[in-house]
Image (cartoon, rainbow, N blue to C red):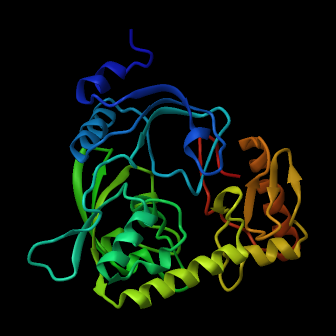
Amino acid sequence: MALVPYEDQLRAVTKDVIKINEPLANHTTFGIGGPADALVCPKDMATTVRILSVAAGHDIPCHILGRGSNLLVADSGVRGLVVKTTDVAWHPPLQPIAGLSNQYEVGGGVPISVLLAHCLKKQLTGLEPLTGIPGTLGGAIAMNAGTQNGTVSEVVERVCAFDLTDGTLRQFSRTACEFGYRSSRFLQGHRLVVLSAQLHLGPADRDDIATYMREQVLTRRASQPWRSRSAGSVFRNPPGDSAGRLIEKAGWKGCRVGGAEVSLEHANFIVNVGHASAADVMTLIRRIKASIKRQFGVELELELRIWGADAP
C-alpha cells in the first residue's frame, strides 16, 4: 500500500529507492531538519526527468536537494517530494561539446569540489572562485555563487532546466538566467530545476590554478568555521557593507539559542554546536535582523534558503 498518494506513480518511473518520511537532517550540512514526505535519489538524467514529470503532472510539491548546504529545513519537515541530485551519473564531470572550443556540458548535481578537481587535472580555468563552496553546480547557478573574485555566472553560457509548471525542458542563455548578486531566475518561484549547464572554461597552467585554489582554501579556513556544522553565510551583504561586520559590531558573536550559536570565527555564520533545532536558528535570525535594523537602519536579507517555514 502506498504511504504517500503519489508513491505508485513514482515507482512506475524509477527503480531507485524511495524513502518515506526521511529526516532531512541526514542530508544537510547544518544537520538540522524534519522529514520529507518522500525522498528519491535518481541515478541518471533520464530518470530524473521522469520523476520531475510525475511531480509536474500530479501537481506534487517538489524540492531539489544537492549537498544540503545553504539550507535550513524546518523541524516539521517539508511536504511533497524531495529529489536529491548528487547521485545522478555524469561521467566525465566536464563533457566537451563537439565543435565548440572551450565549451563543456556539466550536470547540475555534480559537486563543485569534483568539478574543481577535474578542472585542475585538465588545466581549465574559470571556476576557481568557487573553491571551498560545498554545494553542487545546480545550486551554485541558482544562487550565482562565488566570491569577490568572481561568480559562476561569468562562465555560464547556457542552462538546461526542467519547468515544473508545465513539465517541459527549457534552455536559457546567460542573459535569460537573470543573474544578480546571489540570485537568478532559478530561485524565483522554485519552479525551474537546473539539470545541466554549458560552461566556458579556458586553458591555464596547472600550477597557477593549484596556487589560486590553495590560497582560496587557506583564506576560507582562516576566517570561516569550516570545522563546524553550518549552512554557510546566513545573510546577503548589504550594498557597500558586510553582514558579518554589522553582526559582529552589534555584539552577536558567540550568542546562542539552544544548540545554535553565532560563530566566533565569522559572525555571518550560525553553527550547530549540539542538537540545534530549526526553531533555534530561526530565533537567532529574527533577533539578529531586528537588532541590525534597530542599531544601523539596515534590513538584512537572507542568503540562507528555508524549507517548510516562512522566512523571518
Placement of 35 over or under 93, stated as above or below: above
Quick one: quadrant of the N terminus?
Answer: top left
How many marks do you count on the picture? 0
Judge from the rendering whether residue 36 lies leftward or rightward of residue 245; answer left or right.
left
Residue farthest to the top? Answer: 1
The percent position of residue 167, horizontal first and vertical second, equals 25, 43
Q: Is residue 24 at all visible to an observer of this figure?
A: yes
The percent position of residue 104, horizontal first and vertical second, equals 23, 72
Q: Is residue 178 at all visible to an observer of this figure?
A: no
Q: Quadrant of residue 31?
A: top right
- At 42% across and 73% down in the image, what residue appears? 179
The percent position of residue 66, horizontal first and vertical second, equals 46, 51
Judge from the rendering whether residue 47 lies leftward or rightward of residue 217; answer left or right.
left
The percent position of residue 228, horizontal first and vertical second, equals 71, 57
Judge from the rendering whether residue 70 lies leftward or rightward of residue 82; answer left or right.
right
- At 82% across and 69% down in the image, what residue appears? 292
Residue farthest to the left? Answer: 99
Placement of 237 over or under 38, stated as above or below: below
- At 54% across and 50% down in the image, what residue appears? 68
Q: Quadrant of residue 172?
A: bottom left
- At 86% across and 49% down in the image, what residue appears? 257
